Image (cartoon, grey):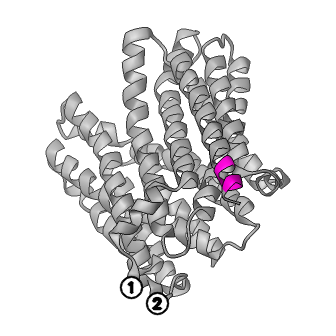
Amino acid sequence: MTKLLYFIIIVAFIDTFIQLPIITPYAVGLGASHVLTGAIVAVYSLTNMVGNVLGGHWIDKYGRKRMLLTGMVSVTIILLLYPLAQSGYQLLAIRFLHGLAGGFLIPAAFAYVGDKTKAGAQGKTMAFTGAAIGLAAIIGPAIGGAMAARSKIEYVFLFVAILFVITSFLLFRYIEESFVSSDRGKVHMKHFIPLLKNPMLLQASLAAFTIMISNGTLAFALPLKVEAIGLDTSVTGALLSTFGIVAIIIFLTPLNRIYDYMKPLTLVGIGIFLIGCALLFLSYITTFWTGILAMIIYGTGFAFIFPSMNRMVAEGSTQMDRGKAYGIFYAAFSLGVVAGSFISGAIAELFGLPFIFIAVIMFIACTSLLLIGRMRQKRSQKSD
């Protein structure tokens, strides 16, 4: 059952990653202006935040399986609408609905994983989920780009829809509900308030927001940096692949024992610091190999952060509010995606490449997280 959950996570994230290389040209092909194209790209993340929060509540109220299956079926139907779009505004409406429905999937899947993970094994389990996402991030854009180049872009959406139909059947047939308590009927929207005051969840959400800002900066500024130092554009892909491969190696090898040996907040702090160092280093690279070294540092930092902050959400929530906790957490993720693109563009426009500025943000976030953790520890000691 747990292995099938990892497969579901891969499919859910492929839905997002496979569209990265195709959604902009698809919008332009429908006659969308640059402004409308930007809105089409951004609206998915914006409505995804709403879907994360609403879905998080319903996941606790109606159960993980029902909401995960609802999200899968809804996204399947919406994917079939993409080839029918005749204008940029129709595509905008479809992306609006896609982000909303897709927002149910990830909190439900991670609530499932959190429910099924035994105490003391959260770190390694979350490392495997990180590997699942990393695999989706590598194969998704590659499949999307290759299919779009060899056939119509519309076929990409049909391919993902078929993948979702298969996954929905496997989910319906082989996954059992993990939260069957009678307490489900007591779930209420007001239960969001204690979660928003939960220090561990707030720390994890701040880490998620921070790491997605860094990812947005990397996606925006790395191609410009590669071009500025006179390297071929294909180098960008190699550098981004290096970061992903390093993270997956740490997730899947015995190195993943570190997640159970060290406190998650400590690993998050170290990871954000490493990412800050990598971004700072990227400002000064002049060769391909110095770029590879910077991306190895970045990939190591990312690998430390992702499973650790997911573990913090699992440990900072109960089965009764875990869906809402992951809804809040992944809403912070989506917000970071939007903010990362905007901040990177603004800083590049005003000051040039934004690596140094974002690196400073990473160092401030690292310090803030550790200070919050120390304050929480002191309060815990006083209460004891």
- Residue 182: image tag: 2
**Quadrant of res 237:** top right
Quadrant housing the C terminus:
bottom right
Is residue 337 within the magenta segment?
no
Number of marks present in the image shown = 2
**Label 1–label 2 contact, CB within 8 A:** yes
Q: Residue at x 41, y 17 (%)?
A: 347
- Could you say which is closer to the camera, residue 31 or residue 119? 119
Quadrant housing the N terminus:
bottom right
Judge from the rendering whether residue 73 lies leftward or rightward of residue 209; answer left or right.
left
Marks 1 and 2, Cα distance to the nearest angstrom?
A: 6 Å
**Is residue 76 shown to the viewer in this render?**
no
- Could you say which is closer to the camera, residue 380 or residue 382? 382
In the displayed structure, would residue 77 be above or below residue 212? below
In the displayed structure, would residue 91 be above or below residue 224? below
Q: Secondary structure at mark 1?
A: helix
